[in-house]
Image (tube, grey):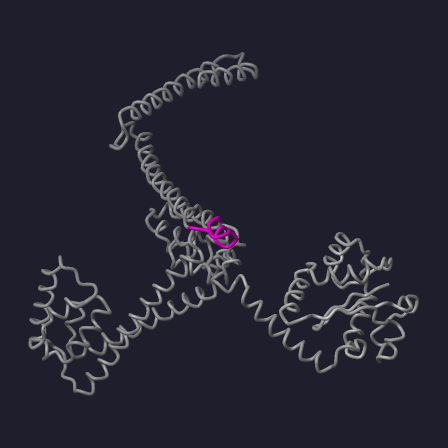
């Protein structure tokens, strides 16, 4: 029997000297406590050393994936097949053994006794392999572990979306901090100029004005029109609104009810306002970065639900590969786990949507149709995610095409909702108040409604006549059902 054993420096092939002793020993690990006792049981048959670290990493990576590398195949071909050895080969991986047996025709065996023997070989490997020193073995083992870890990190399928997960988490934190800081600026500066809060709704614009103005007594001296024109959000068509805002700010500043503050106070308020402005600029820069990364990593998902919702779904699942493994029903309620378990515990209705609720396709639907749209959108998202994660060089063509389908479904549900509403009116009053239905459909509905009423009247008269007769039996009832079916046809 031969034993295949891999080391950081190369492949070893051992030959078992006494198979009967190997089979009879119950605990090989405790019985073999030295290199002398191990040398009485096995001996080194052949050894193939790695040429460099890259070859070692490639061979080890193949072994981890239970694949047969070129180095191992050539080693077994020269050491076993070419020498026409009929011994069986002991291995530690069943999948690798089946591939060796299929490609090279070597019989492979695997059992617990051999696994214990390999543990003993691992503990005494430096003394058995005489061509390699313990120091060389230790150095090669350390270098191989570092290179293998670097190789896993480099070719990890989850590394591409790690940046997206970190970016969307940072974006959420920045939005929370930005809201807290901006509210603090309004509360703090509101003691000095409380009327400005009613005139400026935008938090970032409010902080910019505080930075530019300072104390409210400086407002008549400053050119506010030039300040508004230098803003990125300024549009030339809104000059009248800007002029009105400037006049209101100047008029209110003259009669403000705010208290007076010192230079140190306004200096600290302006410092906080500058922090809000810089944080808003950083948030916009991070948002642009997130858009670019999502377009490159998950183009179909981005086209379908947007980069923010798509990034939140990936972050909630952990990675794009993990999200691709989720079914559509899980994607639909992803992010609503608390509501789901609370509904299951209290025996209430389960939630219809989670993070997917913030998608524009769900938001533009009416409240009664949002559950349907979220279910359809989750199914399409599951398809788009799998194409993005498992497809080769995917583009956003699938996402655009699927988005058009969902938008068409939204319009159909809205129209169908109007039809059901008018149907109730028609059944209760017999009239038609839907102006969107054309004359042909209106006449068709009206004729069907009249035929249904006529048939109900004839059916009631027929049943009444049968009930008045004494010979009303099961055969007559069956005939009545047949006539009813024929009349409907």
Whether residue 41 sits left or right of residue 356 in the image: it is right
* Quarter where residue 224 is shown: bottom left
Q: Position of residue 47 (x, y in %)?
A: 78, 70
* Residue 154 vertical placement versus 438 (above, below): below
Q: Is residue 394 magenta?
A: yes
* Residue segment shown in magenta: 383-395
Q: Position of residue 199 (x, y in %)?
A: 15, 67
Foreground pick, 323 / 397: 397
Q: Is residue 167 magenta?
A: no
Quadrant of the drawing holding the C terminus: top left
Foreground pick, 160 / 28: 160
Q: Position of residue 318 (x, y in %)?
A: 50, 63
Foreground pick, 195 / 481: 195
Whether residue 308 sits left or right of residue 236 in the image: it is right
Look at 81% across and 70% down and name the residue there.
116
Look at 70% across and 63% down and name the residue there.
71
Look at 29% across and 27% down and name the residue there.
430
* Residue 463 vertical placement versus 407 (above, below): above
* Quarter where residue 175 is shown: bottom left
Count of numbered labels shown in the rendering: 0
């Amino acid at each position: 029997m031969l034993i295949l054993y891999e080391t950081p420096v190369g492949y070893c092939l051992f030959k078992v000297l006494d198979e009967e002793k190997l089979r009879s020993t119950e605990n090989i690990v405790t019985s073999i406590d030295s290199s002398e006792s191990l040398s009485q049981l096995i001996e080194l048959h052949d050894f193939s050393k790695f040429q460099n670290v890259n070859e070692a990493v490639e061979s080890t990576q193949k072994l981890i994936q239970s694949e047969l590398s070129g180095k191992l195949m050539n080693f077994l071909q020269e050491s076993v097949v070419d020498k026409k050895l009929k011994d069986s080969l002991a291995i530690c991986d069943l999948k690798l053994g089946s591939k060796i047996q299929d490609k090279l025709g070597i019989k492979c065996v695997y059992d617990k006794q051999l696994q214990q023997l390999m543990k003993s070989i691992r503990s005494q490997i430096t003394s058995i392999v005489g061509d390699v020193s313990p120091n060389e073995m230790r150095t090669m083992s350390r270098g191989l572990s570092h290179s293998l870890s670097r190789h896993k990190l480099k070719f990890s399928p989850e590394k591409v979306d790690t940046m997206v997960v970190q970016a969307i988490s940072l974006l959420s934190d920045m939005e929370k901090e930005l809201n807290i800081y901006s509210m603090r600026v309004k509360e703090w500066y509101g003691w000095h100029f409380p009327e400005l809060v009613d005139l400026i709704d935008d938090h970032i614009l409010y902080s910019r004005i505080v930075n530019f103005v300072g104390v409210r007594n400086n407002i008549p001296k400053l050119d506010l029109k030039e300040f508004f024109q230098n803003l990125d959000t300024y549009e030339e068509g809104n000059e009248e609104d800007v002029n009105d805002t400037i006049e209101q700010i100047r008029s209110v500043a003259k009669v403000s009810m705010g208290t007076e503050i010192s230079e140190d106070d306004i200096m600290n308020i302006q410092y906080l306002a500058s922090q809000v402005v810089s944080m808003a600029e950083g948030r916009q820069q991070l948002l642009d970065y997130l858009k670019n990364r999502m377009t490159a990593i998950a183009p179909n998902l981005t086209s379908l639900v947007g980069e923010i919702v798509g990034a939140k779904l990936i972050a909630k699942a952990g990675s794009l590969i993990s999200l691709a493994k989720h079914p559509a029903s899980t994607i639909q309620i992803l992010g609503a786990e608390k509501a789901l378990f609370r509904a299951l515990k209290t025996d209430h209705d389960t939630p219809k949507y989670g993070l997917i609720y913030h998608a524009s396709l769900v938001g533009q639907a009416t409240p009664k149709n949002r559950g349907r749209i979220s279910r359809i959108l989750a199914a399409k998202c599951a398809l788009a995610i799998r194409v993005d994660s498992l497809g080769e060089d995917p583009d956003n063509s699938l996402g655009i095409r699927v988005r058009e389908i969902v938008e068409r479904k939204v319009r159909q549900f809205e129209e169908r909702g109007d039809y059901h509403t008018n149907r109730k009116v028609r059944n209760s009053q017999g009239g038609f108040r839907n102006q969107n239905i054309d004359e042909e459909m209106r006449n068709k509905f009206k004729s069907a409604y009249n035929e249904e009423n006529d048939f109900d009247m004839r059916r009631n008269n027929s049943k009444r006549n049968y009930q008045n007769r004494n010979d009303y039996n099961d055969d007559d009832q069956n005939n009545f059902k047949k006539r009813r079916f024929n009349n409907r046809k």
